[in-house]
């Protein structure tokens, strides 16, 4: 893995203000993790792009540093970041990304508003067609994809049947009024 060293810090990201784009470092005061690059080409391209975006790029004196997992862990500990918490957050983000990709297939049929993972429980919030009521579907985030999709389809089918029954009941109530 690779990181970008500059001046006296390790690159963590950028921020914009009225004067342009600037870098912020990873350190113990902001508890930001350093930006990690998997390949030398990736880090080189990123530095090239940074130099185009930031004012006075030569003053930063960029250096590419190669780190092992142990170097990364040691650095995180030195700035007060809990590695276990970091790994849990990464795993959560990976699961959310995976399930968002899976549920992207229903786009056009059902409007998925958001997908969240908390404590390995997935929550899909969605709208049924012709409805503005938010429905939620809960699932175990580490279950087999086919089982989750099957359960989701069953839940949507049940919601559809409930909506149809509500419309029928409403129609009968209207007839009884006249």
Image (cartoon, grey):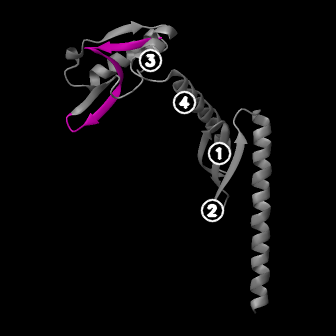
Where disc 3 sits, the SS reads helix
Cα separation, mark 4 vs mark 3, equals: 16 Å
Q: Earlier in the sequence, mark 2 or mark 1?
A: 1
Q: Earlier in the sequence, mark 2 or mark 3?
A: 3
Identify the disc placed on residue 89.
4
Instruction: Determine if residue 135 is in view.
Output: yes
Task: State which tag comes first along the sequence, 4 or 3.
Answer: 3
Other residues around mark 2 within 10 Å, as few (<14) / some (14–19) / many (≥20): few
- The residue that mark 1 highlights is 123
**Label 3: few (<14), some or many (≥20) within 10 Å?**
few
Point out the frontmost of discs 2 and 1.
Answer: 1
Residue of label 2: 133
Instruction: Give the mark, 2 or 4, whose residue is nearer the N terminus.
Output: 4
Give the quadrant of residue 97: top right
Marks 2 and 3 in Cβ contact (< 8 Å): no
Rate crowding at label 1 as few (under 14), some (14 to 19) or many (20 or more) other CA atoms within 10 Å: many
Picture disc at residue 77: 3
Residue drawn at 79 percent across, 45 percent down: 151
* 134 w.r.t. 140: above or below: below
- Name the quarter where the C terminus is drawn: bottom right
């Amino acid at each position: 893995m690779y990181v970008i060293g500059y001046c006296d810090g390790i690159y963590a990201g950028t921020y914009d203000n009225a004067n342009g784009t600037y870098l912020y470092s990873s350190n113990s005061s902001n508890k930001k993790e350093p930006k990690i690059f998997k390949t030398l080409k990736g880090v080189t391209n990123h530095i090239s792009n940074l130099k185009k975006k930031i004012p006075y790029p030569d003053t930063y004196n960029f250096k590419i540093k190669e780190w092992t997992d142990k170097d990364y862990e040691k650095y995180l500990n030195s700035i007060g970041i809990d590695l276990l918490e970091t790994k849990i957050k990464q795993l959560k983000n990976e699961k959310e990304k995976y399930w968002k990709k899976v549920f992207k297939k229903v786009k056009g049929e059902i409007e998925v508003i958001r997908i969240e993972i908390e404590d390995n429980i997935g929550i899909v919030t969605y709208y049924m067609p012709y409805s503005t009521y938010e429905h939620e579907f809960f699932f175990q985030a580490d279950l087999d994809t086919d089982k989750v999709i099957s359960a989701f389809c069953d839940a949507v089918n049940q919601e559809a049947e409930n909506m149809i029954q509500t419309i029928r009941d409403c129609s009968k109530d209207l007839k009884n009024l006249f």
